[in-house]
Amino acid sequence: MFEALFEGLAALAQPVPLGWLIFGVVLGVWGGALPGVGGPAQLAVLLPFAMLMSPVNAIAFLIGVTTVGNTGNTFTSVLVAVPGGSGAQATVLDGYPMARNGEARRALSAAFMVSMLGGIIGALILFSSIPVMKTIVRSFGSPELFMFTIWGLSMIGTMSAGAPLKGLSAAVLGVLLSTVGQDIKSGVIRFDIDHPYLWEGISVVLISLSIFAIPEMIALAARKGRVADVSELGTTGLWEGIKDAFRHKWLVLRSAAIGTWVGVLPGLGSDVADWFAYASAKQTEKNTENFGKGDVRGVIAPESSNNAKEGGALLTTLAFGIPGSTSMALLLIAFVAVGLNPGPAMLEGELHYIMIIIVALVLSQILASGICWAMVKPAAYVCFFPFYVLVPIIVALTFLSAFAAHFTILDIYVLLGLSLFGYLMKVTGWPRAPIVLGFVLGEKVELYLWLSVARYDMDWVWRPGVLILGTLIAFTLLWPVWKARKAALTAEAGA
Amino acid sequence: MFQIHKSRTACVSKAITRVTAAALLGGVGLVSAAPVSAAEEFYKGKTFTVMVATRAGGGTDTTGRLVARFWGDHIPGKPDIIVRNKPLQLIGANDLHNKVRPDGLTVGVFAGGGTLGPVLRGSSAVRFDLMEWGYVGAIERGASVQIVRKSALARMRDPKAKPIAMGSVSTDRTQDATAVFGAEYLGWNLKFVLGYPNSNAIYLAYGRGEIDMFGSGTVTILNRFIKDEGAMPLVVEAARPDFPDVPVFTDLLRKKNLSPEAWAAFRQWTGSGAIDKYFALPPKTPKARLDTLRASFIATTQDPRFKEQANNIFGGGYIPLTGPQTREAIAGAITPDPKGLAVIKRLRAKYGLPKVSREGKPLVAVTFDKVQRGGRVLLFTHKGKNMKLRVSGSRSEITIAGKIAPRAALKPGMTCMMNWAKRGDRVEARKVNCLARVTFDKVQRGGRVLRFSHDGKDMKLRVSGSRSEISIGGEIKPRSALKAGMTCSLSWAKRGDRVEARKVICP
C-alpha cells in the first residue's frame, strides 16, 4: 500500500498535474464563495474539458474543483448569513453571530484552519480504512440508514434554543415541505396544488436562502446598521482563530470523524454532515449556553465535518463505483471517461490511482485553506459595509442563486413567500435550523422506512444495527434532560 | 411469442441498415442542407440544453452526456451545450411537455421503461402525450439481463424458502415485467423491493445483501457483479451475443403455453423497453429545428470520437435510431391492448406493485345516430350537442355485451356506455361498452326476473332493486316498470351463481 502511495505522490509531483490541481482549487474556492455557482453545477460545466485530459491530470483538476467548495463557501455563511452551499448551512448558526460580534476574522480563520485539518483527517481515514472499507459500508442497510436519519431528526432538540416543542413543530414542517412534489417511489404527485412548478418539489437552496439569508438581510436593513455591531475588527482575530482550532482539537477530530462517516454512507446525503457535527458538538461540549450566539465551536464543528466528508464520499465512489451524491456521480462519469475503473477492481489493480486521489485531496485542502486564509483580512471588511450597500448586493445575489434553482420566476415568488415566513419565525423567536434539517432529512426518512418495510416487513426493527442506533437515539433525547436535571440538583445543593 | 424477439432484432437490424445508408449516401447532409443557414444563424452563440430526465450517474444520464459531449460540433452554429438532470423520468417528461419552451434549444433524454410504462398503465402522474413530442433519435443498447446472487439461487424454485428479493426503481422497467412473469409462470420465488431512487442505489443494495436480484443492460455493470460480487446471469430478455449461454426469457415462457391474454400483457409491459434511451423535443417545436437536430444527432452518433467512447461504455452493443424510427417504435409501444391490460392489473395487484392508475372519465350512455366508415366515426347527441367521435383501432376499447369487439361491429341505434378524450384536434373514443339490445319475452315476479333470447341463447336475468340501474325514456324507474315485449339495451354481470342485470336502458 505504501509503495502505491509513493507512486501516487511521484505522479502528482509534476508541474502539469500540480498546475491543474491549483487551477482546480482556485475554481473550486471561487465557486464555493459565490452562492449557487459551485457544487454540481460548476462540476457539470467543467466535466467535458476534464474528460479530455490524461487520468492523472483529470484527477488533480477534478479533486481540486470538487473537494474545496466547502472551504470557499464559509465566507458568505459567516459574513452575510447566506449559506454558500449545502455543506455550510449549520455554519451560519454561530458564524454570523460571530461576525456581528466583530469576530468575523476569528470565525473565518478558525473555519479555514479546521477545514484543512478536517479534510486531511478525512483523507487519512480514507487511507487507513481501505482494507476494511467494504465491510463498513455493507453493514449499513436501509433500516440502519433509516435509524440514522431519525437520529439526525432527534438532534433538533439541541437546535431549538430551549423551545423543544417549537423546534419539533418546525422540523415537522420541514419534513412536510420535503414531501411536496412527485414521489420517487410511486410516481404519485403530492401537494402540487395543480401547479407543474411543484412537481419537482421545493429546492433546498430556496429553503436555506429564505430561512437564513433574507430574514437576516431584512433584520440588518431594519437595524439600519452594519453586520458587525462593534466598531473595530481587532487585530488578533486571525491568530485567535488558528489557536481556537488547536484549543478544540478533540472537537475537530470528532467532527471530522462524523463528517467522514456521513460521507462514507452513500444515501445519507452530503448536506447533513454539518448538521450532525453541529448538533453533536452542542450536545457533548461543556458550557454550551453561547451556541447560536457566536460560539467559535459552532463554526469549528460543521466546518471540520463538511471537508472531512469529501474523503468519506470518495471512498465509496472509488471502492464500489457507486456515488453517494450528484457531485460524486459526475466525478465518477469523468473517471470512467478517462479510463479509470472505479469499483472493487480499482482497489486491486489501480491502487496507485486511489493514492493519487488521496494525495490530491490533502494538497487541495491545504491549498484551499491557504488561499481562503489569505483573503480573510480584506473579506472581513464586508461586516463594516453600511446596510444600504450590503443589503442590495446580497439580496440581488440571493435572488440570482434562487433563480438558478429551476430558472423560472416562480423560484423568486417561492423565495419571497418562504422568506416572509422565515422572517416571521425570526422575529417571533422560533428556531429556524430545525425546519432546514427536517427538510434535508425528510425525503430520506420516508425513503428508507419504505425500503425497510418493503424488504423486511417489520422484522427490520430487531436488526442489531437498528437496536444500537435506537439506543443512541434514546441517549440523544435523554442526555439533555439528564444534564439539565443534574445542573438543577447541583444548583440546589449549592444553594 | 417468437415475434417479440424477432421483431426487435428485425427492427434493430433495419435501423443499422438505414442509419448506415443515410450516413454513407450523405443523406444526413442533404436533410439538413436546406435549413442550414437559418439553423446556423439561430443556434450560433446560444446554449443548447440536454435535459436528462434522471439523476446523474445512471444509464440514461451516461447516454445523454455522451451524446451531449459531441453534439455541439454537429449542430449548425455550434451552440454551447449544457446538461441538466431531473430527479425522475416522469418529472422530466411532465416538464418537457408542460414547461419547456418549444424553441429547439432544449432536448429531453428519457428511458423507454420510465416514461412509456406509466403511460401504458394509465398512471395518474402522466401529464404528457408522447404522440405530441418531436423525436430526435434514440440509442438502443443491449437487452436487459436479469442477474441473481449465486448463493440465493437454490431458493428460486422452493416456495417454502425465504423469497429472493428483487430490487427495482419503479416497476415500469422491462426487468420488472420479467420478474413478475417469472414469478407467475415459471414459479420463481420472489419478493419485490421497489422504490430505490436510482440504479446506483440498487447496485449498492445488492452489495450489502439487501436484495439478491436485479436487471441491467449495461455490460460494464453486469460484468462487475458477475466477476466480483458472486452474481450469475439468470435470463436475458432477448438474445445477446455477449451472453450466448444464458437462457432467453421468452423461450422459457413459450414452454409454459401462456394464454393469448398473458402474451398480450407481456408484450405490452416489455414493449415500453423496446425503445431504450431516446431524445425528444417538446410539442410544437418548429419542424425545421426538429429536422436540424435529427440530422445532427445521427451525425453525432457517426462521429469517430463518439463511437470510441460509446464502445468503451456500452461494450460495442449499441445502435442509434433516427427520429422517425424512434417515433414509430414509441407509437407501437404505447398502443394499449385491453386484454393485456387486464392481466397486467391482476398481476400488479397480486405481487403488490403500485397501482397508480388514472381514474377513468365516467361512462355516459349514448345512442348512435350514425356510424360511418366501418365504425371509424360515431355520430350522436349528448347533452343537446351533436358529437362526432373517432374510434381508433388500437387505442379505443370496445366491448359489446361484455365481449371485446372490433369497431366494425358498432352499428347505428346501439346504446353504449362510453367516454372519450381529446387527441390532437380530434375527439377520440376511449371506452365503448355497448349494451346488448334485446326484447323481453317474459318479465316475471314484478320485474325481478327477465327472460329473453340473445345470440341464439335463452337468457334469464335477475334484476336487483338496489344494484340494477333502470331507465325508461331517460328517467330512472323501479323494476316493476319493466314489461314483456319491451325492447331495451342491457348489460349484465355474474353475481354468485346468478346473472344480474347492471344497466337496463329502455327508450
Image: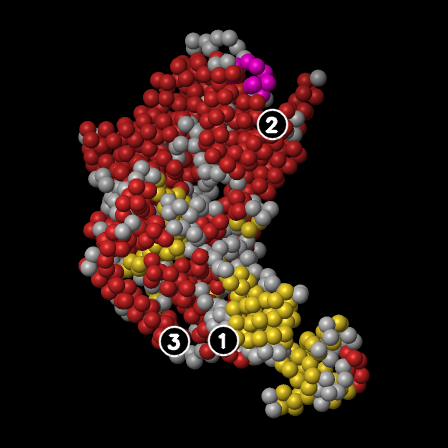
Residue at position x 69%, y 83% in the image: B487
User: Quick one: label 3, few (<14), some, or many (20+) residues within 10 Å?
Assistant: some
Q: Which residue is mark 2?
A: A423
Q: Quadrant of the N terminus of chain B?
A: bottom left
Give the camera-side residue of A61 and A260: A61
The verdict on residue A221 being magenta is yes
Disc 3 is placed on an element classified as: loop
Residue A62 location (% of width, % of height): 30, 36
The chain carrying label 3 is: B
Q: Which residue is mark 1?
A: B373
Residue A377 location (% of width, % of height): 39, 14
Quadrant in the rendering for residue B350: bottom right
Earlier residue among tags 3 and 1: 3
Q: Which residue is mark 3?
A: B1
Q: Which of the two discs, 1 and 2, sits closer to the camera?
A: 1
Vertical placement of residue B301 versus B388, above or below: above
Residue at position x 35%, y 43% in the image: B48
Vertical placement of residue A306 versus B330, above or below: above
The verdict on residue A183 being magenta is no
Amino acid type assigned to the residue bearing label 2 in the image: Tyr
